[in-house]
């Protein structure tokens, strides 16, 4: 069965400091799985819809681990290429006070070599949504070019395009990112996700509702603007709603935005009302924060509905 959503990007093996010390100090680490668009593909599958992933992984233990992870969670891997000459990327995470500290080891990793020729081989027949992010594009010139081929082919096959800005200053300059973002928002994206920091990268002043409204004028059908602990805004051409973040005991916020996006895409597939979609996405994102790592806390649809219903065990 063809997946409803194809997600394109970079998977990363993740290592978290057990004792939350700075990475400059010796310590023990727990390993988990990361990568923004991989998180989205996994989140969609856990929420009861079908997803697939487009990427390259190394012929190594991490690549094998990702393949096992995706397959065990029902994520289609027919568009995952195994690169025998390169390794799978990774990152290390710790905390400085309440802030995360990241060190990446991704240069020349397998995912960064995904090419235009690779993109031309992806079968989009029957695919309803293509999802990608700024990270998917910023890791290499090859991936940037391949992303436009994927978007063109998705559009030709009638698929909706979902784009999460997910700006990373270490990968590209804000000026280059801004130019690419506006090009995609104006010419490709039907669903746009961003956070309040990325609102600043775009140079958009004012409150989140005004910024979302301005982005809608460029062409998208849906704009979701996440504001961390302040909540989020989802705007369509008919309606704009704002919601507060849900209260949970937070273990780790990494991956919450990806779960929010996965939830938004699932709600789109289910043709949910925008208010319902916002509450669902905020709840799923909050539940992700209850465990360390970007995928461990990702909820099922039942868990989200239980949480929304005030289930004391889940909440």
Image (cartoon, grey):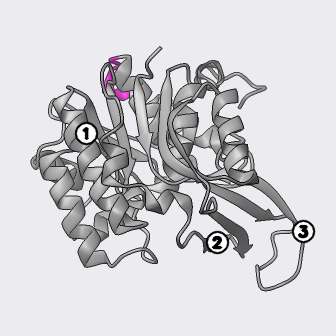
In the rendered image of this protein, does residue 126 appear above or below residue 61?
above
**Helix, strand or loop under label 3:** loop
Query: Residue 114 at what x, y percent from top left?
Result: 42, 55
Magenta residue span: 271-276
Residue under the image location 84 percent in, 84 percent down = 25
| Residue position marked by numbered label 3 in the rendering | 28
Q: Between tags 3 and 1, which lies in front?
A: 3
In the rendered image of this protein, does residue 268 appear above or below residue 223?
above
- The image quarter containing residue 74 is top right
Which residue occupies the foreground of this view, 307 or 139? Answer: 139
Query: Residue 92 at what x, y percent from top left?
Result: 70, 69
Is residue 21 in sight in this rendering? yes
Query: Residue 271 at what x, y percent from top left?
Result: 32, 17
**Helix, strand or loop under label 2:** strand
Q: Mark number for residue 80?
A: none
Whether residue 48 is in magenta: the answer is no
| Residue position marked by numbered label 2 in the rendering | 99
Whole-number angstrom distance, CA of label 2 to CA of label 3: 19 Å
Is residue 283 in sight in this rendering? no
Whole-number angstrom distance, CA of label 1 to CA of label 2: 30 Å
In the rendered image of this protein, does residue 214 appear above or below residue 268?
below
């Amino acid at each position: 069965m063809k997946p409803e959503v194809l997600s394109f990007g970079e998977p990363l093996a993740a290592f978290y400091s057990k004792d939350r010390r700075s990475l400059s100090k010796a310590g023990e680490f727990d390993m988990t799985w990361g990568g923004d668009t991989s998180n989205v593909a996994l989140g969609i599958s856990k929420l009861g819809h079908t997803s697939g992933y487009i990427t390259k992984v190394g012929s190594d233990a991490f690549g094998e681990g990702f393949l096992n992870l995706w397959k065990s969670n029902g994520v289609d891997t027919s568009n995952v290429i195994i690169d025998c000459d390169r390794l799978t990327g990774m990152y290390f995470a710790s905390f400085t006070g309440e802030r995360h500290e990241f060190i990446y080891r991704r240069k020349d990793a397998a995912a960064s070599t995904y090419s235009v020729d690779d993109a031309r081989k992806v079968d989009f027949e029957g695919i309803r949504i293509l999802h990608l992010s700024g990270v998917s594009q910023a890791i290499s010139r090859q991936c940037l070019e391949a992303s436009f081929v994927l978007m063109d082919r998705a559009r030709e096959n009638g698929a909706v395009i979902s784009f999460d800005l997910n700006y990373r200053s270490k990968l590209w300059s804000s000026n280059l990112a801004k130019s690419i973002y506006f090009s995609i928002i104006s010419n490709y994206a039907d669903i746009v996700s961003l956070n309040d920091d990325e609102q600043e990268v775009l140079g958009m002043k004012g409150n989140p509702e005004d910024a979302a409204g301005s982005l809608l004028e460029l062409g998208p059908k849906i704009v979701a603007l996440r504001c961390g602990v302040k909540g989020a805004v989802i705007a369509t051409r008919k309606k704009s709603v704002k919601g507060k973040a849900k209260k949970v005991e937070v273990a780790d916020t990494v991956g919450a935005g990806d779960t929010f996006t996965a939830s938004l895409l699932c709600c789109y597939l289910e043709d949910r009302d925008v208010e319902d979609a916002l509450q669902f996405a905020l709840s799923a994102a909050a539940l992700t924060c209850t465990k360390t790592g970007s995928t461990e806390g990702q909820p099922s649809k039942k868990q989200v509905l239980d949480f929304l219903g005030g289930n004391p065990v889940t909440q």
